[in-house]
Amino acid sequence: MDKSKIFWTNMRCKVGDSLLDKLERLVTKAGIDSIDFKNKYVAIKIHFGEPGNLAFLRPNWARVVVDHVKRLGGMPFLTDCNTLYVGRRNQALNHMEAAFENGYSPFATHCHNIIADGLKGTDGVDVPVNGGIYCKTANIGRAIMDADIVLSLNHFKGHECASFGGSLKNLGMGSGSRAGKMIMHNEGKPQVDESLCIGCKICAKYCAQGAISFSANRKAHIDSDKCVGCGRCIGTCNQNAIANSSGGSFQLLNYKIAEYAKAVIDGRPSFHINVINQVSPYCDCHGENDAAIIPDIGIFAGFDPVALDKACLDAANAAPPIKTSAIGECENQYHDYFKNLHPTTDGMAQITHGEKIGLGTSLYELVFVD
């Protein structure tokens, strides 16, 4: 298989030349203009960030992409789907307010926000997964499927269930309706280590399914019949008392993420951008962000989301770790920072499975854009 070209630029800026200028040059050099945007609806899949988290991509990045698409005659909108867990983005009204709070207003980005799976997360459409092994169909937010073209603008960071989040995670998990997210998550069921649990009940606060109860001795218990495996409790437990019961379950989640991503972009033009900055250990779905684990690296773009994520994963793991971050506290020492942080996960499963089902290739050629 031929290598996919991935274009990238670093975070260095000369006086009078901003990162936004560099993003504009990058997407142009990477070939976004070869897409026919004329009078086409363009879904720009993004993560608006959970309020309280400050590591999400600022709306300034999105405005560059929006304005570029408009100059090419397209009709762009920013979009995401509702979440499974309890938070500020679990239904469309809260989701829109959260987006505005984080600066994603039409005045800042020059386009509208559309919550793709509707008011309650129920507006999904079943889409065939061409070559799917674990999912024959994927339930995707309707507005995303109504678009003629899909672009993804992604913050590259860690993730407690998927190991890392890049273009595949944003496209696959992020485009799933609530029903789709449950299908992807339902094989992964966490369990509690009672010797570590202190009964603080923070995990129960964030469980949207009411699956966590407490015994007389104040130890948490997870009802696997109610649990949908979203992994929110894992990330919110400060005692590390909750973990996935089987690493294989998270591996299956990553397979499904790749299959959902394929369903989203199959049969229509797509283009993808990853920004590697403020690389927090956890997803931007958290209402907080820990210190970055590595220095800011740069912006990467291309047409192949598999090659894009592999290039970014390699670049992140080649960077020096920040010793005062969570990575400095890890006892396990893999050659993968994200596996150090989340030992039961394997983010490479997204990439290898995406390659297996024809979503893209893990082989890439890096092209630097100054």
Image: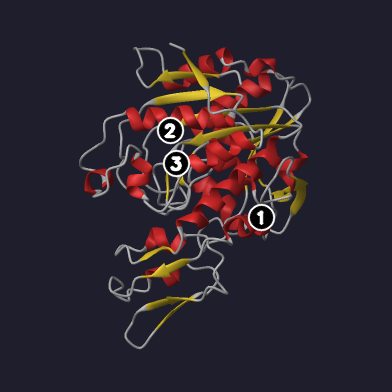
Cβ–Cβ below 8 Å for labels 2 and 1? no
Earlier along the polypeptide chain: callout 2 or callout 3? 3
Where disc 2 sits, the SS reads: helix
**CA distance for labels 2 and 1:** 26 Å
Residue 43 in picture, x, y percent from top left: 68, 36
Q: Amino acid at mark 3?
A: Phe
Residue 254 visible to the viewer: yes
Does 197 sit above or below residue 366? below
Residue 213 in picture, x, y percent from top left: 44, 80
Q: In the rendered view, does 18 fall on the left or right side of 230? A: left
Q: In the rendered view, does 327 fall on the left or right side of 255? A: left
Residue 269 in picture, x, y percent from top left: 71, 27
Which quadrant: the C terminus?
top left
Q: Nearer the viewer, mark 2 or mark 3?
A: 2
Q: Nearer the viewer, residue 353 or 232?
A: 353
Which quadrant: the N terminus?
top right
Query: What is the total number of numbered labels drawn onto the structure image?
Result: 3
Does 26 sit above or below residue 183? above
**CA distance for labels 3 and 1:** 23 Å
Does 334 sit above or below residue 16? below
Q: Nearer the viewer, mark 2 or mark 1?
A: 2
**Residue 180 shows which numbered tag?**
1
Q: Residue at x 69, y 35 (%)?
A: 265
Residue 110 in picture, x, y percent from top left: 61, 31
Look at mark 3 in the image and give the residue it sits on: 56
Look at mark 2 in the image and give the residue it sits on: 313
Q: Amino acid at mark 2?
A: Leu
Q: Amino acid at mark 1?
A: Gly
What's the colour scheme? secondary structure
Earlier along the polypeptide chain: callout 2 or callout 1? 1
Label 1: how many residues lie within 10 Å, few (<14), some (14-19) or many (20+)? many
